[in-house]
Amino acid sequence: MARWQSGSRERLAEAALRLFATQGFERTTVAEIATEAGLTERTFFRYFADKREVLFAGSERFEAGFLDGVAASGATTPMALVTASLRQAAEFFTEDRRAWSRSRAVVVAANPALQERELHKMGGVVETLTAALVERGVDAVTAGLAAETGVSVFRRAFAAWIAEGESRPFAELQDELLTRLQALLGSP
Amino acid sequence: MARWQSGSRERLAEAALRLFATQGFERTTVAEIATEAGLTERTFFRYFADKREVLFAGSERFEAGFLDGVAASGATTPMALVTASLRQAAEFFTEDRRAWSRSRAVVVAANPALQERELHKMGGVVETLTAALVERGVDAVTAGLAAETGVSVFRRAFAAWIAEGESRPFAELQDELLTRLQALLGSP
């Protein structure tokens, strides 16, 4: 999967991330991104509404993973449903995406407005996952707690996955954290 | 404990919250707060560095609760330490503080900058609690997971405690959530 090597969209995304990383998100213009990618602004706007969308373009598909995992699972306990959700979401983070995710995280961490958007995105996942659990018969309080705990595990797995020098797959890191979580509460 | 009924500090805090709630945090000046409290700006600045500090003045004591709980506990498992931490933190939220907390939450929710500060505050609690667990011999990964899970429970207990019409004490609501969390992970 040469996701980031071909096509105008990919070239624009790579160029944008390179510029965000070197000169800052705020200081980078769409014109500069287009030039860096060897394309026109017009082409840029065919793919992205604005420069911020370069960083958040995959959000719907990312969020959908969490829901698909619940939908495809025959599990009946809340935590088994959350585990199914997280395992499906993990498939989004393929090896060819790791370098991009790593650079993206540095750009987001450097900009409060982007951080806020990112937090909002993850808050949205907690909400939709909660709703999906409720739909499967889990009471609202437990569903909220289960969804938030699951998303905490996901975020920590993500941080580990993009850490310098880490090479294990996302799913493996996340499963390890899920096991730790179980152990945590299995031994009150 | 007539915490909010006497003293200049309390009068200023009450006046500020009343104005923030009715005319918005941004639009309220320190001069207006002082006038509303029947005091001078000079007096205001004896107690608070700026108007934002009215809303975050108790933060150190609030955070200290989480740490004191760990320090005073003889527990050896991570989750028992987190439970001790949460129970100590709950003592901050006495009945005479509920109305204030309720109004404060509305003001914070209406202002993105205040929300960010609040998130930052809770992020600080996760970090210091993680460090306290590590100091008690818990490995860093488990400590981070335990601290974040604990703070999620705390935040949900807080939201329940300030909900319209809720009259049960903070500690009771929080213990109920902790029980649910245990049940959640006891049944994989």
Image: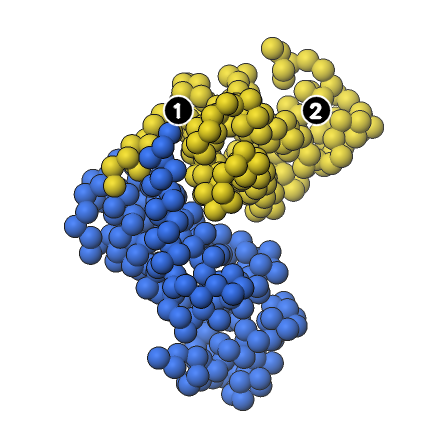
Chain colours: A blue, B yellow
Up/down of B170 relative to A117, above or below: above
Task: Name the residue beneath numbered marker 2.
Answer: B12
Q: Nearer the viewer, mark 2 or mark 1?
A: 1
Chain where mark 1 sits: B
Secondary element type, mark 1: helix
Q: Where does residue A102 sit, x and y in percent of width and height?
A: 51, 66
Question: Looking at the rendering, in which quadrant would you find the N terminus of chain A?
Answer: bottom left
Is residue A186 among the parts visible in the rendering?
yes
2 and 1 marks on the same chain: yes
Which is nearer the eye, B120 or A167? A167
Q: Where does residue A93 sit, x and y in percent of width and height?
A: 38, 65
User: Tag 1: residue type?
Assistant: Asp
Which is nearer the eye, A159 or B58? A159
Farthest residue, direction top? B1
Secondary element type, mark 2: helix
Determine the residue positioned at 54% across, 79% down: A15
Determine the residue positioned at 57% across, 65% down: A107
Determine the residue positioned at 20% across, 56% down: A72
User: Tag 2: residue type?
Assistant: Leu
Question: Looking at the rendering, in which quadrant would you find the C terminus of chain A?
Answer: top left
Q: Where does residue B23 sit, x and y in percent of width and height?
A: 61, 36
Instruction: Residue B175: give its label.
Output: 1
Q: Where does residue A53 sit, x and y in percent of width and height?
A: 48, 68
Chain where mark 2 sits: B
Dot 1: within a 10 Å radius of its alpha carbon, few (fewer than 14), some, or many (20 or more) residues?
some
User: Quadrant of the rendered structure where residue B49 is?
Assistant: top right
Q: Earlier in the sequence, mark 2 or mark 1?
A: 2
Left or right of A158 on screen, residue B34 = right
